[in-house]
Image: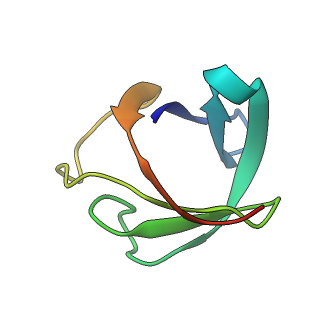
Amino acid sequence: MKVMIRRSHEGILSLYVPKKDLEEPIVKMEKPDMWGGSVTLGNGWELALPEMGPETTLPITVEAKRLSGD
């Protein structure tokens, strides 16, 4: 699914899913630089993100795979 990842002025990472009109904070990351690992959202969803370089700038739209969550 296509998702948009951004960082707020306060430094909080969030992920927006346009098809669900859902925006949730990223509360846990498998890898420190986020890319190529899984992230957990505030609502419990777990998503796998693609491999990208640590220099990748935000906001960005990427293809993510949903691993778990209601």
Horizontal and vertical percent position of residue 57: 33, 33
69 displayed left or right of 51: right
Furthest residue in direction bottom, as rendered? 30
15 displayed left or right of 38: right
Horizontal and vertical percent position of residue 26: 66, 57
Horizontal and vertical percent position of residue 64: 41, 46
Furthest residue in direction front, as rendered? 70
How many marks the image carries: the answer is 0
Horizontal and vertical percent position of residue 2: 45, 29
Along the line of sight, the residue nearer the viewer: 48 or 10:
48
Q: Residue at x 47, y 26 (%)?
A: 59
Q: Quadrant of the C terminus?
A: bottom right
Q: Residue at x 40, y 27 (%)?
A: 60
Along the line of sight, the residue nearer the viewer: 70 or 9:
70
16 displayed left or right of 44: left
Q: Residue at x 44, y 78 (%)?
A: 30
Furthest residue in direction right, as rendered? 43
Q: Residue at x 53, y 65 (%)?
A: 39
Q: How is the image coloured?
A: rainbow
Establish if 62 lies above or below 38. Answer: above
